[in-house]
Image: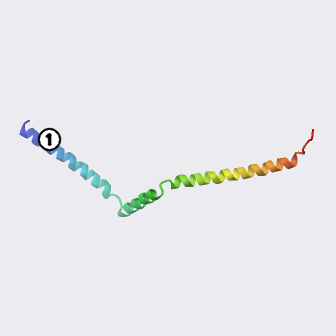
């Protein structure tokens, strides 16, 4: 391989690495410093209780099912009171 060609390959590789690093730095420098602490707090909260949202949804579903069962049993009791038993 020619030394000038190797030199240009190294220069182009370094330029690509520098441009990528500048792009990453620019993307992170646009954020506010508070957003890092909020992001870190959110991540640690998720790590402590990763299924919190699922548990809340299941609790709500369980409550709604219990309410429907209670309504169903009340309606069933009312129907039994209205129907006279026949001893056919």
Q: Quadrant of the N terminus?
A: top left
Classify 58 as above or below 4. below
Q: Residues within 10 Å of mark 1 (few under 14, many from 20)?
A: few
Q: Which residue is located at x 21 percent, y 45 percent?
A: 16
In this orientation, which residue lies closer to the viewer: 48 or 71?
48
Give percent across and percent down for residue 81.
86, 49
Q: Quadrant of residue 32?
A: bottom left
Q: Quadrant of residue 2?
A: top left
Give percent across and percent down for residue 4.
7, 40
Q: Is residue 67 left or right of residue 43?
A: right
Q: Which residue is located at x 81 percent, y 50 percent?
A: 77
Q: Is residue 34 left or right of residue 78?
A: left
Q: Is residue 27 left or right of residue 78?
A: left
Picture mark count: 1
Give percent across and percent down for residue 60.
61, 54
Residue bearing mark 1? 9
Give percent across and percent down for residue 59.
60, 54
Q: Which residue is located at x 10 percent, y 42 percent?
A: 7
Which residue appears farthest toward the top when viewing the image? 1
């Amino acid at each position: 391989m020619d030394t000038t060609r190797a030199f240009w390959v190294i220069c182009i590789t370094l330029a690509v690495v520098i441009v990528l690093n500048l792009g990453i730095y620019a993307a992170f420098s646009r954020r506010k410093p508070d957003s890092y602490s909020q992001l870190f707090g959110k991540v640690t909260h998720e790590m402590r209780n990763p299924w919190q949202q699922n548990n809340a949804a299941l609790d709500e579903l369980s409550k709604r099912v219990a309410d429907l069962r209670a309504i169903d049993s009340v309606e069933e009791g009312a129907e039994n009171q209205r129907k006279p038993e026949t001893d056919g």
